[in-house]
Structure formats: structure tokens, C-alpha cells
């Protein structure tokens, strides 16, 4: 894309930034980049994803909304090891505390304002079958239709984790590992995407919008740009995928890449030709 834009550099005005977002899958990269001011001077922000809700080459979803806010965190339980046969009463089982917390978290009340999720993706504990386990690790994520709902679910999760630790008389520490906000694409960017795609004529099925139903820390970029008076949008490029996202056999049709370069480049060209709105 940078190479394409360099060929029309003399026709463009303003500053064009290509943002290479690290740590997206763990929702860790965008927040730190936002805190460094990387998008503070951005008038128009455009991001995207391939596959997921668009599963054929030639599909295009011009506006993605319904980003679920999410919090990723680890809980580390610390108990006391003991011989499980000779001195079980001297032990404090971190495993039992973590197992109790795992079940308790599934009982968090849902929120009337929108969808919510919680998942314990990893539970590791113990060192041997004859040892009262003195350590346990839980890797957890919460999600919500809004950042407020996600905050509610996380607060309840932390309360239950601490309560489970207290019940089994062990210690617990909780460490934040990443997160993302809720978000919606601006109608102006959605319209620009649709008009550009129609003009290019390289897409077979152009859809206005769909709900993401997942999380993406690009939402931090979107929020910052919007709060500073800019416009932000997120699109989805269609591609056949060999297996589902996050599957070990995942693969995509690389033909989508040239379509993506063409679309993004032409959108930037149109914005650059009209100049900054601020």
C-alpha cells in the first residue's frame, strides 16, 4: 500500500500514517500506541479484517459495528503444599480455590443492557498427584456489548475470585493482561467505503454493515480519533478460509490482499485529494 501511495504522492495533501498494530490478538497493542499519541493528529482512520463475517472472495462489508468490549486478566492462587497422604491438614489447596472460582464465574448475573460473556480459557495447578497443590493459574476473559457491561462482568468476576480464595484460605493476585473497548464505524467512513468499492468494481457483493460480535483493540484507536473530532471506520474483506479463526488449520485466500490494497489505497487517495477537514 505504501508503494502504491508513493506513486501519487504529489497529488495528496496532509499526513498519511500506516499503523502496524502489534499484539492485536492479545488486545495489548493499541492502548499503548494510543497513550503515545500515535493517532492524536488523525482526521480519518480506516481499519479492517479479513474473513470472519465475509467468507467469499469478492465480499465486502463496508461498516463493522458491535465491537464487544473485553478484559483479559490472570488470577494466580498461592496456597501451601503438603503431603496429601501423611499431612493433608497442613496444606491449603490453590487448585480447589481456582476450581471453585471457575464454577462461580459461570453464575455471574447477566446485564439487562446488553450481551455479556465470560470464559476461563486456561486452568493450571499442582505439581503431583500426592501433593496438595500450592499454586494455580487461571486465564480469564470477560466481554460486553458496551465497555460499561464489560466492566460490570469483570468487577463481579474479581469479587468471586477473591471470595473463592478466602473460602479456601489461600492468597490470590490478579493481573490485567489486555483489553478492548466497544465501538461502531462512523457512517461517513461506511459511505466512503461503499462508494469507493463500487467505483473500483472489484467486489461482487458489497454489504453496508454487520455486527462484529467479537473484540478488537482497534476500538481504542477509533475512540481516540472520534473524541478528537475525527471519523473512524472498520471494514471486512471477504476470503475463503480453510478453517475457523483461531483454528490451527486456519488459512486464507491471498487473492484478498490485492483487493484490500486497492480499496484502502483508493480511499486514502480520495481523502488526500480533498484535504483535511480540520
Image (cartoon, grey):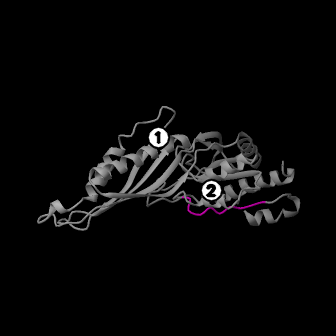
Q: Is residue 48 left or right of residue 79?
A: right
Asked if the stretch drawn in magenta spans residue 114, the answer is: no
Q: Pick whichever, 138 or 46, lies toward us.
A: 138
Q: Quadrant of the N terminus?
A: bottom right
Q: Which residue lies furthest to the top in this view?
A: 112
Q: In this view, does 36 lie to the left or right of 69?
A: right
Q: What element carries label 2?
A: helix
Q: Could you tell me residue 23's position as x and y percent?
A: 56, 62
158 versus 251 height, above or below: above
Q: Could you tell me residue 50's position as x and y percent?
A: 59, 53
Q: How many residues crowd around disc 1 within 10 Å: few (fewer than 14), some, or many (20 or more)?
A: many
Residue named by callout 1: 116
Alpha-carbon distance for marks 2 and 1?
Answer: 32 Å
Kindly identify the residue that appears in the image at 72 percent across and 55 percent down. Answer: 264
Of the image marks 2 and 1, the number of the one nearer the N terminus = 1
> Is residue 66 visible in this depiction of the protein?
yes
Q: Give the range drawn in magenta.
A: 16-24
Amino acid at each position: 500500500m505504501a508503494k502504491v501511495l508513493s506513486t501519487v504522492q504529489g497529488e495528496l495533501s496532509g499526513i498519511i500514517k500506516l499503523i502496524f498494530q502489534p499484539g492485536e490478538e492479545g488486545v495489548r497493542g493499541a492502548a499503548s500506541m494510543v497513550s503515545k499519541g500515535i493517532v492524536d493528529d488523525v482526521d480519518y482512520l480506516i481499519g479492517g479484517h479479513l474473513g470472519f463475517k465475509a467468507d467469499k472472495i469478492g465480499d465486502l462489508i463496508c461498516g463493522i459495528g458491535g465491537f464487544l468490549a473485553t478484559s483479559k486478566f490472570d488470577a494466580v492462587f498461592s496456597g501451601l503444599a503438603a503431603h496429601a497422604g501423611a499431612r493433608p491438614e497442613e496444606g491449603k489447596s490453590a487448585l480447589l480455590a481456582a476450581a471453585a472460582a471457575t464454577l462461580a464465574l459461570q453464575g455471574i448475573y447477566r446485564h439487562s443492557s446488553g450481551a455479556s460473556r465470560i470464559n476461563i480459557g486456561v486452568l493450571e495447578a499442582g505439581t503431583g498427584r500426592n501433593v496438595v497443590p500450592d499454586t494455580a493459574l487461571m486465564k480469564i476473559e470477560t466481554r460486553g456489548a458496551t465497555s460499561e457491561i464489560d466492566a460490570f462482568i469483570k468487577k463481579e468476576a474479581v469479587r468471586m475470585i477473591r471470595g473463592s480464595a478466602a473460602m479456601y484460605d489461600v492468597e490470590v493476585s490478579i493481573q490485567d493482561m489486555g483489553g478492548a473497548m466497544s465501538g461502531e464505524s462512523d457512517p461517513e467512513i461506511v459511505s466512503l467505503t461503499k462508494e469507493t468499492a463500487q467505483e473500483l468494481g472489484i467486489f461482487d457483493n458489497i454489504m453496508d454493515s454487520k455486527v462484529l460480535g467479537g473484540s478488537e483493540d482497534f476500538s481504542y484507536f477509533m475512540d481516540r480519533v472520534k473524541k478528537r473530532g475525527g471519523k473512524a471506520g472498520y471494514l471486512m474483506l471477504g476470503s475463503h478460509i480453510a478453517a475457523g479463526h483461531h483454528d490451527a488449520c486456519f488459512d486464507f485466500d491471498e487473492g484478498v490482499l490485492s483487493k484490500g490494497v486497492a480499496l484502502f489505497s483508493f480511499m486514502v487517495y480520495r481523502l488526500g485529494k480533498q484535504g483535511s477537514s480540520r
